[in-house]
Image: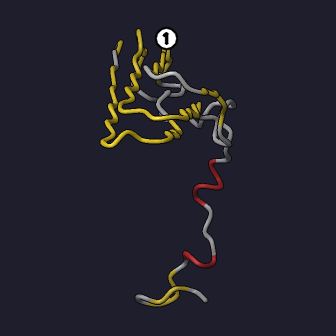
Amino acid sequence: MRIRVSHQIVHRFDPPARTVNQILRLTPLSFDSQYVLRWRVDIDADGARRETEDAHGNAVISYSHYGPIERVTIMARCGSVMAKTPTNRPPSPSCRYSPSGMTAVAPLSKITSYGAFAA
């Protein structure tokens, strides 16, 4: 199945903002049941833009505009995302986290008696 996505964020400032700083996480990841063919994030105001990746492998766009600004429009859109029904198999080797880390029991999350947590 092909999915098209269009997401628009409009910020209006009254009075005009002196600076604007945005950290955007609007780009989907490709994985076993989803493949992103084309993806684009546009910002209509001039400013410094830096694209990086966080510790989990997510695309992060940092945007800064210095000087008076009344409006910023951010548009995330894709040409196509291929999605298929997920299977019950373990995550692919491209995953950056250990699935066992998500299911491990931590001492502070273990219930020792009704309503009391471990100290």
User: x%, y% of residue 77?
Assistant: 39, 17
User: x%, y% of residue 86?
Assistant: 44, 29
User: x%, y% of residue 112?
Assistant: 52, 87
* SS of the residue under disc 1: strand
Q: Residue at x 69, y 31 (%)?
A: 93
The image shows residue 64, relative to residue 113, as above or below, that is above
The image shows residue 62, relative to residue 74, as above or below, that is below
Q: Which residue is mark 1?
A: 38
Q: Residue at x 59, y 37 (%)?
A: 90
Residue situated in front as seen by the camera: 16 or 86: 16
Left or right: 96, with 69 as reference point: right
Q: Residue at x 52, y 85 (%)?
A: 117
Q: Amino acid at mark 1?
A: Arg
Structural crowding at the residue carrying mark 1, measured as other residues with C-alpha within 10 Å and reported as few (<14), some (14–19) or many (≥20): few
Number of numbered labels in the structure image: 1
Q: Quadrant of the C terminus?
A: bottom right
The image shows residue 68, relative to residue 37, as above or below, that is below
Q: Residue at x 34, y 35 (%)?
A: 11
